[in-house]
Image: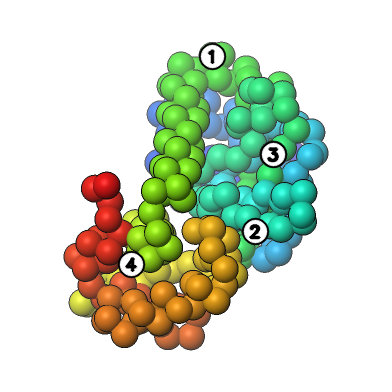
C-alpha cells in the first residue's frame, strides 16, 4: 500500500536526527514502502518487557518512556526517547527479549521496521550501520553516567543533573528562563534519580525557594541554569 506523503520517510520531521539521515530519496522511499506507521495514544505500550523483538521502532514525533520492572514489581524509568530516536535496536542485535517496556507519554507517531528488512538496510548502507553504532554508544554512555551518578552523587545533585538533562533535551528558551516541554509526575522524576517521592518533593521545594526553578501547573521552568550547574556538581 502506498504511504501518504505525511508518513513518508523523506517528509519525517525527525529525519535529520534519525539513523536514516544520510540516505538518498530512493532509499528512503524503499524504507517507507516496507515500514508500518502507527500512532500511539498516551499510556499505550509499543512493546513489553520480556517480549521477543521482531524489528526496530523509529520515533517520528512524541515522547516515550522506557521502564524496567523489578522482581518487587517496582517500575523504574530507564530513559526517555523522542523524535529521531530508535527503540529495540539492542535486543534486535543481541536476540534477547526486551529488557524493558516502552510506553507513550503523549500522542506519539512511530514507524516499525521488521528485523529482516532493517538488517538488509544496515548491510547495504554503511552510514546507517554507523549511525546505529553511534546510537548504541550514546546509550551505553548514558547508562554509565547514570550508574556513576547514582553511586557518587547525593539526591540534590542527581535532581539538579536530571533537570539539566531535561532542559537539554526538551528545553525551549522563553525570555529569561527555559521551559521544559515534557510533563513528568513527581513519581516519575523520583524513579529517574533513585529516590523516594517525599524526598524529591523536599528538594524540589528547596530549588524553588532558591530561585533556581519554578513550576506552573505541571510545567517546569529553569530560571538559573548557572546555579543549577553548580548544584549538579558535574565535575566530580
Instruction: For marks 3 and 4, give the CA distance.
Output: 32 Å
Frontmost residue, 77 versus 152: 152
Q: Secondary structure at mark 3?
A: loop
Estimate the spatial distance between the alpha carbons at disc 2 and disc 4, rounded to whole Å: 21 Å
Q: Earlier in the sequence, mark 2 or mark 1?
A: 2
Residue depth check, mark 2 versus mark 1: number of the one nearer the observer: 2
Position in image of residue 139 (x %, y %): 48, 37
Q: Earlier in the sequence, mark 1 or mark 4?
A: 1
Q: Residue at x 58, y 21 (%)?
A: 121
The reply to whether the C-beta atoms of the residues labelled 1 and 4 are less than 8 Å apart is: no
> Which is in the foreground here, disc 1 or disc 4?
4
Residue corresponding to mark 1: 124
**The label number, if any, that marks residue 16 in the structure image:** none
Q: Which mark is residue 104?
A: 2
Residue in front for this viewpoint, 59 or 160: 160
Mark 1 or mark 3, whichever is nearer to me? 3
**Residue ID at (54%, 63%):** 195
Amino acid at each position: 500500500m502506498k504511504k501518504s506523503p505525511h508518513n513518508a520517510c523523506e517528509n519525517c520531521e525527525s529525519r535529520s536526527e534519525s539513523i536514516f539521515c544520510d540516505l538518498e530519496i530512493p532509499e528512503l522511499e524503499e524504507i517507507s514502502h516496507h515500514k508500518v506507521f502507527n500512532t500511539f495514544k498516551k499510556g499505550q505500550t509499543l512493546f513489553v518487557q520480556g517480549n521477543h523483538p521482531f524489528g526496530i521502532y523509529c520515533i517520528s514525533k512524541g515522547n516515550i518512556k522506557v521502564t524496567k520492572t523489578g522482581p518487587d514489581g517496582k517500575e523504574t524509568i530507564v530513559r526517555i526517547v523522542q523524535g529521531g530516536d530508535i527503540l529495540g535496536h539492542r535486543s534486535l542485535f543481541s536476540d534477547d527479549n526486551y529488557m524493558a517496556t516502552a510506553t507513550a507519554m503523549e500522542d506519539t507517531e512511530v514507524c516499525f521496521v521488521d528485523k529482516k528488512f532493517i538488517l538488509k538496510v544496515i548491510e547495504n548502507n554503511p552510514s546507517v550501520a554507523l549511525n546505529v553504532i553511534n546510537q548504541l554508544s550514546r546509550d551505553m554512555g548514558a547508562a554509565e553516567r547514570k550508574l556513576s551518578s547514582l553511586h557518587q552523587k547525593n539526591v540534590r545533585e542527581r535532581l539538579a543533573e536530571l533537570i539539566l538533562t531535561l532542559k537539554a533535551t526538551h528545553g525551549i528558551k522563553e525570555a529569561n528562563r527555559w521551559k521544559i516541554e515534557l510533563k513528568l509526575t513527581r513519581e516519575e522524576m523520583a524513579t529517574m534519580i533513585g529516590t523516594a517521592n517525599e524526598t524529591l518533593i523536599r528538594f524540589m521545594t528547596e530549588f524553588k525557594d532558591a530561585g533556581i526553578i519554578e513550576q506552573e501547573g505541571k510545567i517546569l521552568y529553569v530560571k538559573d541554569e548557572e546555579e543549577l550547574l553548580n548544584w549538579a556538581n558535574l565535575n566530580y
